[in-house]
Amino acid sequence: MPLVLASTSPYRRELLARLRLPFDTRRPEVDETPLPGETTTALVTRLALAKAEAVARQRPDDWVIGSDQAAEFDGAPLGKPGDRERAIAQLLAMSGRAIAFRTAVAVVGPDGRRLAALDTTTVRFRSLAREEIARYVDAEQPFDCAGSFKSEGLGIALFTAIESCDPTALVGLPLIATAGLLRETGFALP
């Protein structure tokens, strides 16, 4: 069965490759602006489905995976910083705090099925000085990462703990949930 990842994220592509299924990637054209009053959970679930559906319209005979992630900070979604100053500001604000990262995955099929799952990972940041944060940001430049860090790299040094049911979720694609959704649709996985 043809499979497409509705993402050009190298992180998601590397994660999905672990399942050893052949797949293509396509960029979803989706407006990622949060809706007024939208919770972080609702936002990431809506966007994961929207990304999968956008690519499914281009590839109607294929199964499509979409995913989205946002940090929940003081009850509101916190996304990718985009530049150095915003990354430093995000990490300063999260210093010494526990932050929930919501990661949704959706699978849309040619048979009309729309399946979705959500993972919540809690990251506990240690108290961080501005100089430490600046050194980290300059070293990894995590401008395209929700929360301004790469947990699979040097970003792990920013934490005191990570609480998760799926360690891949924080990188951007919860593989345990993804594998479950794919098995439910008929993909042969262990």
Image (spheres, rainbow, N blue to C red):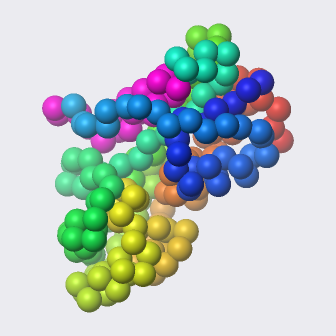
Vertical order, 138 against 170 (above or below): below
Q: Position of residue 33 (x, y in %)?
A: 25, 37
Closer to us: 112 or 181: 112
The stretch drawn in magenta includes residue 94? no
Closer to us: 5 or 114: 5
| Quadrant (top left, top right, bottom left, bottom right) of the C terminus | top right
Left or right of 11? Residue 1 is: right
Vertical order, 22 against 12 (above or below): above
For the record, the magenta segment spans 36-55
Q: Position of residue 38 (x, y in %)?
A: 23, 33
Q: Position of residue 71 (x, y in %)?
A: 33, 53
Q: Is residue 105 visible?
A: no
Q: Work out which residue is located at the far left of the displayed protein and give it.
A: 36
The stretch drawn in magenta includes residue 51? yes
Left or right of 158? Residue 89 is: left
Q: Residue visible at 31% across and 52% down?
A: 79
Q: Work out which residue is located at the far top of the displayed protein and give it.
A: 111
Using the rendered view, name the quadrant where residue 35 is placed: top left
Vertical order, 106 against 150 (above or below): above
Using the rendered view, name the quadrant where residue 14 is placed: bottom right
Most common secondary structure along the magenta stretch = helix
Q: Is residue 113 visible?
A: yes
Q: Residue visible at 39% across and 58% down?
A: 144
Q: Residue visible at 56% across and 56% down?
A: 11
Using the rendered view, name the quadrant where residue 1 is placed: top right
Left or right of 114? Residue 83 is: left
